[in-house]
Image (cartoon, rainbow, N blue to C red):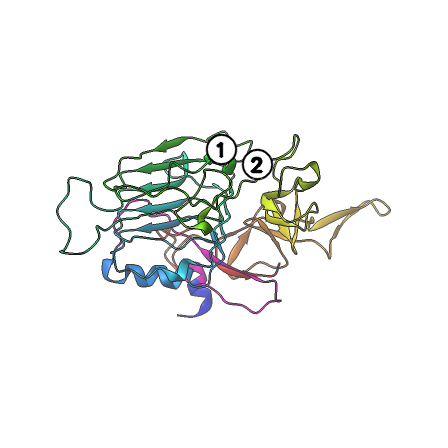
Amino acid sequence: MELAAWCRWGLLLALLPSGAAGTQVCTGTDMKLRLPASPETHLDMLRHLYQACQVVQGNLELTYLPANASLSFLQDIQEVQGYVLIAHSQVRQVPLQRLRIVRGTQLFEDNYALAVLDNGEPPEGGASEAGAAPGGLRELQLRSLTEILKGGVLIQRNPQLCHQDTILWKDIFHKNNQLALMLIDTNRSRACPPCSPACKDPHCWGASSGDCQSLTRTVCAGGCARCKGPKPTDCCHEQCAAGCTGPKHSDCLACLHFNHSGICELHCPALVTYNTDTFESMPNPEGRYTFGASCVTACPCECQGGEQGQLRAAAESPGSGTRRPGLETWLPHFLVM
């Protein structure tokens, strides 16, 4: 199948050449808790979607995974536009240690940006194989997650899961997140180790010294939305999300609105400007399309231009005129940042 058709179906991660600062962006899924159409190839499909991906333009749904599933292909993901769902799986860990921000442009059950459900056997379930540890998620290990822009957290029925109650979720929720709900079940079938003594605060994602929670909101001086420390000079720029390394809008760990060539902006440059001398609208050579939370120079693959330069992918199957179920409307692309 040619590249254009792959783009229409929303399945291919397009690895297009760019500068050294390029970001690999991939599509997401919209299956919720539905069983995969082909359980035999489900893991291969996820690997195909997310290998080397850094930004998921949609939802990251990891469901119905066996205990021996290798998920190392998730280790580069830094941003999810929609929600993160981990459910009905026997894997003991999900390597999302680099995930910084969940935007919540779509929400699970209309409320949740992060949902972790029914991973592992319930405490009263059947016995495991002799000598084998029970299956199911044991730690979230989202050690880089410092921003949920919209939506809450739902963690239910994960009998092996530890440390969901040692996270200061308030620090992760954006100050204007009106759906910052928390339904967090701590019923478990094993004893959990404490946070590492290396953690300055009693907040952690796991037991190791590398799992201490990084606080970027509740420790800030007054007036800071995000910060890199408690001093007034540690405040992040107002266009930053997730935290920062300095005060400028080029120092952000993630952008609150749009990333324009490594600088966080409220808007992308308009495609058309008004010439006050000639009273005419003129094309802006510096104009950019908006694609997710990024400003891009051209329409990637086969997508449709919307109002004010917004891009979205055609959601129909090739030649059918019908929407492809379970696939997002955003196309994968290798953005030039």
Q: Quadrant of the N terminus?
A: bottom left
Mark number, residue 20: none
Residue found 23% across the figure and 51% down from its top: 135
Labelled pair 1, 2 in contact (Cβ < 8 Å): yes
Q: Position of residue 180 (x, y in %)?
A: 46, 31
Assess whether residue 109 is covered by the magenta stretch.
no
Q: Position of residue 57 (x, y in %)?
A: 48, 52
Instruction: Indicate the quadrant where residue 232 lies.
Output: top right
Identity, as a three-letter code, of the amino acid under mark 2? Arg
Q: Which residue is mark 1?
A: 170
Taking 70 as reference, is 142 above or below it?
above
> Is residue 9 in view from this perspective?
no
> Is residue 34 in view from this perspective?
yes
Q: Residues within 10 Å of mark 2 (few under 14, many from 20)?
A: many
- Write the start and end of the magenta stretch as one range: 7-36
Nearest the eye: 162 or 40: 162
- Classified by dominant secondary structure, the portion drawn in magenta counts as loop
Q: Residues within 10 Å of mark 1 (few under 14, many from 20)?
A: some
Q: CA distance from mark 1 to mark 2?
A: 8 Å
Q: Could you tell me which secondary element the residue under label 2 belongs to?
A: loop
Nearest the eye: 267 or 274: 267
Nearest the eye: 75 or 26: 75
Q: Could you tell me which secondary element the residue under label 1 belongs to?
A: helix
Residue 127 is left or right of residue 57, and the answer is left
Q: Which residue is mark 2?
A: 217
Q: Position of residue 79 (x, y in %)?
A: 50, 50
Identity, as a three-letter code, of the amino acid under mark 1? Lys
Nearer-N-terminus badge (1/2):
1
